Image (spheres, rainbow, N blue to C red):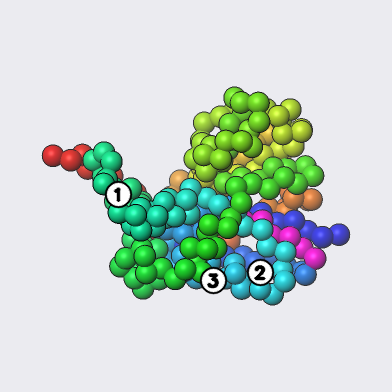
Amino acid sequence: MKKQWVIADIHGCAKSLQNLVEEQIRLEPKDELYLLGDYIDRGPDSKGVIDYIMDLQSRSQQIFPIKGNHEDVLLRCYAHELSRPQPLGLYELKDGWLYFGGKATLKSFGVKNILDIPPKYISFMNSLPYYHILEHFVLSHAGLNFDIEDPFSDKLSMLWVKDYSPNKAKIQNRRLIHGHVPCTLSKMLSNISQADAFSLDNGCVYDKNGKGNLIALELNTLNVKIQPNLDQTIYKKIEIPLAA
């Protein structure tokens, strides 16, 4: 029987991802690997993460990445730089992206200007879908907007929402798996066994409060693989100061 693996929120941790896939998961050609977005920012090798994903796809592996909010922000920053409109509010969108992990992404590509990121990486991120529907699960980067009749019509929520009340009836009695919200390993393992919706984000780039691992979940058995961070990076959130 084929295995179906899910990994969330890699955030530039290419070594951790590769070790998790090759040494722990050990994908067979018939297996499927679903990736829940946020491949970039914060960690040291965003380019390496995307290179590895594209390499797996080129080897005819069954790899299904979706879009995260960090890819979405990069793409909007890229479009902003192309069109050069006047900034809105106190900050340009790019300023926020740089504060919250974008500097590490530019460094991994060896560029200072977002427009110098090679087009194939922009095309890859632009091509990513927002969700996947499987037999027993729905996969998205963030949660879903269950307050509307069709949760799949709200793409913004699939990228950003954190606070929501799951309603399995609106997704045909499936369970929702997402990333975006870092949670402790103990809470995650408890949720996997029983919750209608849960996060697989253990905050790979953080090293405190029960976080710091990249997690893979096999959907048929609910078996979990835990990969400690091998990329030797600890990300610290930086508060954006108010303008004087």
Near-viewer residue (144 or 196): 144
- The type of residue carrying mark 3 is Asp
Q: CA distance from mark 1 to mark 2?
A: 36 Å
Q: Give x and y (percent) for residue 181.
A: 51, 42
Determine which residue is flagged by label 2.
57
Bounds of the magenta span?
A: 30-35
- The type of residue carrying mark 1 is Pro
Determine which residue is flagged by label 3.
51
Q: Residue at x 70, y 56 (%)?
A: 5
Q: Residue at x 21, y 39 (%)?
A: 242
Q: Residue at x 77, y 63 (%)?
A: 31
- Please tell me which of labels 2 and 3 falls first in the chain: 3
- The answer to whether 146 is drawn above or below residue 209 in the figure is above
Classify mark 1: helix, strand or loop. loop
Select label 1 or label 3 by which is in front.
1
Q: Pointer 3: residues within 10 angstroms few (<14), some, or many (20+)?
A: some
Determine which residue is flagged by label 1.
85
- The type of residue carrying mark 2 is Gln
Classify mark 2: helix, strand or loop. helix
- Please tell me which of labels 1 and 2 falls first in the chain: 2
* Residue at far left of view: 244
Q: Is residue 25 left or right of residue 100?
A: right
User: Is the residue under label 3 in contact with that under label 1 (CB below 8 Å)?
Assistant: no
Per the picture, the main secondary structure of the magenta-coloured stretch is strand
- Please tell me which of labels 1 and 3 falls first in the chain: 3
Classify mark 3: helix, strand or loop. helix
Indicate yes or no whether the magenta region holds residue 26. no
Which circle marks residue 156 in the picture? none
Q: Give x and y (percent) for residue 193.
A: 71, 40
Near-viewer residue (157 or 211): 157
